[in-house]
Image: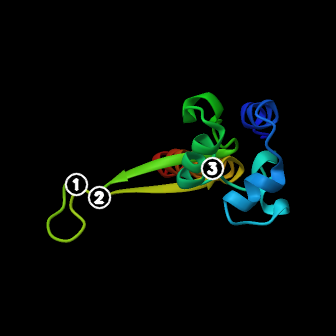
């Protein structure tokens, strides 16, 4: 998803994509992909962009569309990694595909249970 708020703010401040790319130490095509939503903008990049544009991150930040974030909290274990939260980004299409497959398997299980119950 195109980062409309970012683009509008950058243009309003008269800052070119070339200048933003230079500040973020990347080439223009990489910066352009970030504005178009093709490439993810890291938190550090959002912070630097907000600093350059002299605006709060909240005013320019837009979520990465098409991603589901799953939080896996391992805080119940003991030893190394206690209290660590791991974030995994999974494309929505994969998430939906897996959900449909699980539903199909659950239906098959119910069907098999019914068949076994009749015998």
Instruction: Give the camera-side residue of 56 and 30.
Output: 56
In the picture as drawn, the residue positioned furthest to the bottom comes out as: 80
- For label 2, the crowd category at 10 Å Cα-Cα, with few meaning under 14, some 14 to 19 and many 20 or more, is few
The image position of residue 54, as x and y in percent, is 60, 35
- What label sits on residue 105 in the rendered view? none
Mark 1 to mark 2 CA distance (whole Å): 6 Å
Mark 1 to mark 3 CA distance (whole Å): 25 Å
Mark 3 to mark 2 CA distance (whole Å): 24 Å
The image position of residue 36, as x and y in percent, is 82, 46
- What label sits on residue 95 in the rendered view? 3
| Quarter occupied by residue 90 | bottom right
- What label sits on residue 75 in the rendered view? 1
Q: Which residue is drawn at 61% across and 28% down?
A: 59
Circles 1 and 2, Cβ within 8 Å, touching? The answer is yes
Instruction: Give the camera-side residue of 27 and 38.
Output: 27
Query: Which one is in front in this view, the residue at disc 1 or the one at disc 3?
Result: 1
- For label 1, the crowd category at 10 Å Cα-Cα, with few meaning under 14, some 14 to 19 and many 20 or more, is few
Residue 59 vs 89, above or below: the answer is above
């Amino acid at each position: 998803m195109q980062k409309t708020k970012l683009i509008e703010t950058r243009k309003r401040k008269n800052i070119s994509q070339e200048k933003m790319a230079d500040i973020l130490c990347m080439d223009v095509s990489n910066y352009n992909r970030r504005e178009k939503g093709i490439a993810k903008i890291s938190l550090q990049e959002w912070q630097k962009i907000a600093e350059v544009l002299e605006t709060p991150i909240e005013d320019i930040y837009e979520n990465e569309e098409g991603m589901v974030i799953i939080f896996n909290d391992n805080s119940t274990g003991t030893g190394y990694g206690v209290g660590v939260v791991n974030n995994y980004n999974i494309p929505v299409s994969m998430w939906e595909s897996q959900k449909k497959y699980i539903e199909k398997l659950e239906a098959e299980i119910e069907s098999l249970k019914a068949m076994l119950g009749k015998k």
